[in-house]
Image (cartoon, rainbow, N blue to C red):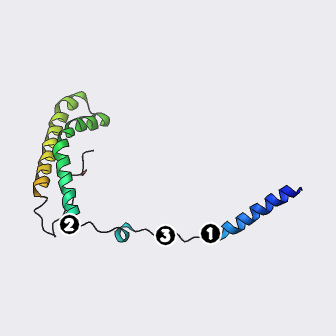
Amino acid sequence: MSKRLWILAGGIAVTVALLLPSIPVMAQMYNPDEDLPKPTFIEKSLTKLGRGMGNIFFGWAEIPMTFDRDLKKGKPLGHLLGVSPVLGTAKALMRTGVGVYEAVSFPYSDKKTNFEPILEPEFIF
């Protein structure tokens, strides 16, 4: 082999020898329950306010979403034109009402109050 190939091979060998000890690195364990800070009362309260405002402003979207969901399920035309709008309107009223409740009640909670969402999914979109 030529001298350049020996130098190149030696350079690669040195690089591999230097990088090899760094391969068996211990992976850092990640547990979000322990590693992330717990949300404060104010953060939970503001999340509840945001969820309530989102449900107030976008509660109406339950109507077309119910129609779309039923359409994708393959429901017949009579169901899509008769049941879906009524069901969507009921869901929209329920989501908007829950939004009003959460927006009004967000500052009036004690520390033992549960801030979990009342409806699932938590946000419409």
Quarter in which the C terminus is drawn: top left
Q: Amino acid at mark 1?
A: Ser
Residue at 19% x, 35% y is 84
Q: Which residue is mark 1?
A: 22
Dots 2, 1 in contact, CB < 8 A: no
Dots 1, 3 in contact, CB < 8 A: no
Q: Amino acid at mark 3?
A: Gln
Residue 91 position within the rendered picture, expressed as x and y whole percent measured from the top left: 16, 43
Q: For numbered disc 3, what is the local secondary structure?
A: loop
Residue at 17% x, 39% y is 60
Q: Which residue is mark 3?
A: 28
Q: Is residue 26 above or below residue 59?
A: below
Task: Decide if residue 59 is on the left or right side of residue 2.
Answer: left
Q: Earlier in the sequence, mark 1 or mark 3?
A: 1
| The quadrant where residue 82 appears | top left
Task: Give the CA separation, mark 3 to mark 2.
Answer: 30 Å
Task: Decide if residue 76 is on the left or right side of residue 92.
Answer: right
Q: Earlier in the sequence, mark 2 or mark 1?
A: 1
* Circle nearer the viewer, 1 or 3: 1
Residue at 79% x, 58% y is 8
| The quadrant where residue 64 appears | top left
Task: Give the CA separation, mark 2 to mark 1.
Answer: 43 Å
Q: Which residue is mark 2?
A: 41
Q: Amino acid at mark 2?
A: Phe
Tell me if residue 10 can be seen: yes
